[in-house]
Image (tube, helix red, strand yellow):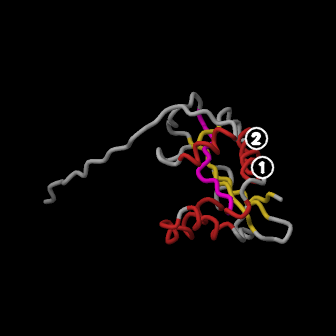
Amino acid sequence: MIKRCTLLDHNGWIPLRIALWPDSASDNDDDAQTMLSAPERYLVLVFVKENGEAAGFAEASLRTDYVNGTNSSPVAFLEGLYVHPASRGAGIARQLVTGVQQWAEQMGCTELASDALLDNAGSHAMHKALGFAETERVVYFLKPLHTLRA
């Protein structure tokens, strides 16, 4: 069963989020508050098994800034998708993405975008299996600036 997380009911989401992004554990409380306080901009779905255990989640947002490879605005963006390894191969990711698509269409979007790291071949294959098409590859660069302080 897929359920939408709310401020009052988001059991199971945070442990799965930590499994996907272990380095962001310290940001989870702030992220949860931000996302769950603005349902007009963010969506968090959790797949809950019959025994009540959370097996996967999807996070999405509406982006109004430029999204690489898209032609419209706002664009629904799949920010994160994770299924516990023991539950993979059962169609949970597909169900979660279908839920995100339905939300995106209700929000007036005509495109659903996502991204993955260049070396994450598993994510690339999953995106293709779920109907996404690769649009471009990007490498980001950063040059620190040292400003003079008076």
Does 11 sit left or right of 113 as displayed? right
Q: Residues within 10 Å of mark 1 (few under 14, many from 20)?
A: some
Q: How crowded is mark 2: few (under 14 residues within 10 Å), some or many (20 or more)?
A: few
Q: Residue 121 carries which label?
A: none
Magenta stretch: includes residue 83: yes
Q: In this view, does 127 lie above or below 13?
A: above
Farthest top residue in view:
71
Residue marked by disc 2: 106
Q: Which mark is residue 95?
A: 1
Residue 82 is situated, as x and y percent measured from the top left of the image, at 64, 57
Q: In which quarter of the image is the N terminus?
A: bottom right
The kind of secondary structure element at disc 2 is helix
Amino acid residing under circle 2: Gln
Q: Nearer the viewer, residue 66 or 45?
A: 45
Main secondary structure type of the part rendered in magenta: strand
| Residue stretch rendered in magenta on the structure | 73-84
Does 34 sit left or right of 96 as displayed? left
Question: Is there CB contact under 8 Å for labels 1 and 2?
Answer: no
Magenta stretch: includes residue 114: no
Name the residue located 74 percent from the left edge and 38 percent from the top edge. Answer: 105
Name the N-terminal-most of marks 1 and 2: 1
